[in-house]
Image (cartoon, rainbow, N blue to C red):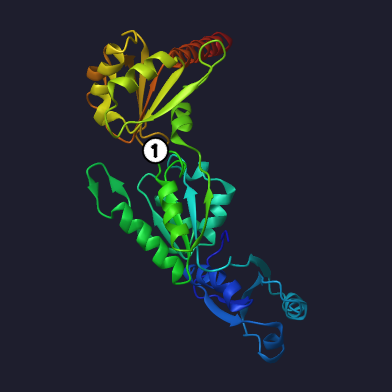
Amino acid sequence: MQLSIDLTGRNVLVAGAPDAARQAVRRYEAAGAVVHRIGSPAEARLVHVPERLFLVAAVEDGQPGWGALLDRCRDAGIPVAAEPAAGPAGHVTLVGGGPGTGDLLTVAAVNALRDADVVFYDRLAPYQELPLLTSAQLVDVGKKPGHHKVSQSDIEKLMVESAVAGNNVVRLKGGDPYVFGRGGEEVAACVAAGVKVHVVSGVTSAISVPAAAGIPVTHRDVSHMFTVVSGHAPLTDKEHHHLAGLGGTIVVLMGIGTLHHLAAGLRRAGMRPDMPMAVVERGYRPGQRTTIADLGTITSAAAGCSNPAVLVIGEVVRVAEANRQHAGAAADLDRLAASLLGS
């Protein structure tokens, strides 16, 4: 339901079976409306439609026979809005929230949030926009480096308990649930408890955050592969040698804390010190910043950087720099042409 009118104090009639209409009722109440309920077409024939009714919300609950009520309301000049039915109660949906901006939420993600009774969200998900996307109860279970106010096992327990209690539960995570998001563990917890669960994929920050800085993770004749690595824990010497020998682009998520160890390890493994490297902080968020150096100098260049950040190692960083310089030169030519024409 997208509202462009003020419903505060307005009489709104929600027509639909109670289970199917519960989401619509909550959305209109959250918008400040005075909500009246009719649960079946038979009830509609017996109940007097409230006077000064502002709007009728017709829930698509599959019951035949609503037409007579809706026709009466339309004939009286009362607008009728179609509302989707709530989904079956008591399930969990893991939703990938993308890199943190609502613009990159998928349609499936928006639909799942709209249908939620409870949302357990992370700090890297677009949680600031949740009040516009859902009327569900919002529970912050976000973890910060070194500070987990709600442990992973407790998050799984909360999700399962809420679903067993009959709620539609959304677990909103940054990026994609299956890319370093512990989504596999949460699915396993639901399956073990006999709770229905499905996953809505999200736009992973491994691709989208470099793109926000103009860096393609692959580029013709430059890189035909990319490897995504978690930066939460230092890599082993074997892993450094493996990465250094792969070629292509290396993308490291949340790697500021292990940046020094990573750069030193890759150099020891034979990666050349002048390999270009970028640190993209706070992708798609206020204060987004990109720091570019090379493998030999990145530790000092990125001394003031902090997570959330994505590290990109590879020749694709030069591609982005060349594109930026070309775009800057083109802009300079445009300004020169404009000044000449103006004179």
Q: How many marks?
A: 1
- Using the rendered image of the protein, determine whether residue 28 is visible from the camera's viewpoint: yes
Residue at the far bottom in the pictured view: 46
Amino acid at circle 1 = Arg
Q: As rendered, which of 324 and 162 lies closer to the eye?
A: 162
Horizontal and vertical percent for residue 269?
A: 31, 13
Seen in the picture, residue 211 relative to 32 is either above or below; the reply is above
Corner quadrant of residue 146: top left
Seen in the picture, residue 62 relative to 46 is either above or below; the reply is above
Viewed as shown, does residue 19 lie left or right of 48? left
Viewed as shown, does residue 105 lie left or right of 213? right
Seen in the picture, residue 207 relative to 340 is either above or below; the reply is below
Horizontal and vertical percent for residue 104?
A: 51, 41
Horizontal and vertical percent for residue 58?
A: 66, 72
- Mark 1 Cα shell of 10 Å, populated few (<14), some (14-19), many (≥20): few
Residue at 48% in and 71% down = 166
Quarter containing the C terminus? top right
| Residue under label 1 | 285
Quarter containing the N terminus? bottom right
- Using the rendered image of the protein, determine whether residue 214 is visible from the camera's viewpoint: no
Q: As rendered, which of 222 and 211 lies closer to the eye?
A: 222
Horizontal and vertical percent for residue 287?
A: 34, 34
Q: As rendered, which of 28 and 233 lies closer to the eye?
A: 233
Q: What element carries label 1?
A: loop
Viewed as shown, does residue 311 lie left or right of 224? left
Residue at 58% in and 67% down = 86
